[in-house]
Image (cartoon, rainbow, N blue to C red):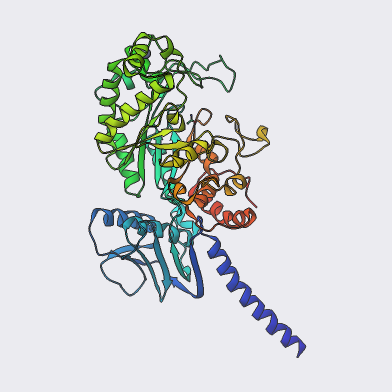
Amino acid sequence: MRKYVFLFVSITFLLFSCKNNENYSFENNIIPKPLNLEINDGFVEFGNKVFLVLNDDSQDALRLKNYISDYLSPCNISIVSEEQKGGVNLVLTLIEAQSKEGYHLTIEDNKIEISSLTYNGLFLGFQTLRQLLPPELEAGNAPELIRLPHIKIYDEPRFKYRGMHLDVCRHFFTVEEVKSYVDLLVMHKFNVFHWHLTDDQGWRIEIKAYPELTRVGSQRSGTLIKKNWGEYDDIPYGGYYTQDEIKEVVKYAEDRFITVIPEIEMPGHALAGLTAYPELGCTGGPYEVSKTWGVFDDVFCAGNEKVFEFLEAVIDEVIELFPNSPYIHIGGDECPKTMWKTCPKCQLRMKEEGLADEHELQSYFVQRMEKYINAKGKQIIGWDEILEGGLAPNATVMSWRGEEGGIAAAKSGHNAIMTPGGYCYFDHYQSEDTDSEPFAIGGFTNCEKIYGWNPIPDSLNNDEAKHILGVQANVWTEYILDLPHVQYMVLPRMATLSEVAWSKQRDAEYSTFKKRLQTMFVRYKNAGYNYAKHEVE
Ligand code: ACM
Ligand code: ZN
């Protein structure tokens, strides 16, 4: 008898723990953590047949159909207008709701249903479903039987701006590589790709009115070796995107409900542009596309009308290429005033405009460009230096030198995006044992630090806090030469920041999140991504 009791207890325990394990693992599959998640008894099981039920041919619906049928092609997916027998139905519906990106995901009664106010929300709901599906799908393989738990999710993001930046100036990334980077944003529910297209070390976007920008400005004669200042590899380096290539990336992102914000740096970080058109600098040059990193005294002349003519023409073309971006990022960071102080044109401008100092001259520059960009129906974003000398009236501030810039912007009624170096610079080391890491610019930002960060500073009241639109991580590529290295720097820090950006309720302990992160690693591995292993348990 005792033997049977023992057997009964063991079997019950086994069944119970299996069920709980299933629940446990499914719940833990989803990063960023959804707002409400309920796992119920039972499973939906299906073999190799999925019906995507979506009865609409709008452009957004087509985007969604293309994306899902591509991702689920190993599952023998067909697009149908009503539910079918002989497979699992994946039903997508638009509903009345408040949140543009919120979605419901319900799995029960042999059916998977995603509903949202928008196709964007349906797409995000599908990203959650993707995380419940077998990770083999990331490698393009489907198991014979797929088992999903009965589940009810309602989810919506904490922040509406969830950005990832990529510097393609210090090192260049091909269209295919940039698309692959956009795929990472998709997987982690980021919605903005900030494309840093111009800098001292290279001008990377074709501008038809100024062909020398790419003919000359996209090339440098060598690159600094590590931090051996003054030592160069003497290997010519360059690259740029034609306008067709830019359009291709923008469309790729748009098909995945991601906005691409272009950054055209001004008035500083301008050496590549000045090398192409030396008359735009205070001294007239000659200049050289920079082989080294840092902040350079030669910047666009703020007293020369030709500079504004040039930048307005550049902006005209850029706006055409990024029709869906509400923003143009105009840089504004790290602009030394050295040349302006001795330039007769800059000094005359200050006198004529009644500007007290060179910071006000920078403010004049940014405000003038803002006016031009606003008149074209777009807003500007600038790094937090644009606060100095007076903030342009409608500008959004990207706070990178800590959170102070974001705080000052929000307190003065301006929008801000938080991207402080200590938490959001993914070019930093992710281990304190730097010898065991690929050479990096410096700093230390690991997942635990990121997870503990609250992007809304305590010093903001509720009304001010509404001006914090969201967060962004920056990937500066001085020492990041290829896509696998980019992946190493952002994975899994991106997963961690995604939860900061998206989840209204995070795990109380980093260790709990870290356990959940393990399921992401399985996905990364299947997708063939080169991820950092520090957080692997
Ligand atoms: C920056 O890192 N210079 C914005
Ligand atoms: Zn000047």
Spot occupied by residue 363 in the image (x, y as percentages of width and height): 38, 26
Q: Nearer the viewer, residue 324 or 495?
A: 324
Task: Please identify the residue farthest to the right as the structure is shown.
Answer: 2
Spot occupied by residue 398 in the image (x, y as percentages of width and height): 45, 37
286 versus 177 height, above or below: above
Inspect this view and state whether residue 455 appears: yes
Q: Nearer the viewer, residue 178 or 154?
A: 154
In this image, 166 relative to 436: left or right? left
The residue sitting at 57% across, 45% down in the picture is: 450
21 versus 180 height, above or below: below
Question: Quadrant of residue 220 in the image?
Answer: top left
Q: Nearer the viewer, residue 165 or 15?
A: 165
260 versus 277 height, above or below: below
The residue sitting at 57% across, 47% down in the picture is: 453
Spot occupied by residue 324 in the image (x, y as percentages of width and height): 29, 43
The residue sitting at 64% across, 55% down in the picture is: 511
185 versus 344 height, above or below: below
Spot occupied by residue 63 in the image (x, y as percentages of width and height): 29, 53
Question: Quadrant of residue 122 in the image?
Answer: bottom left
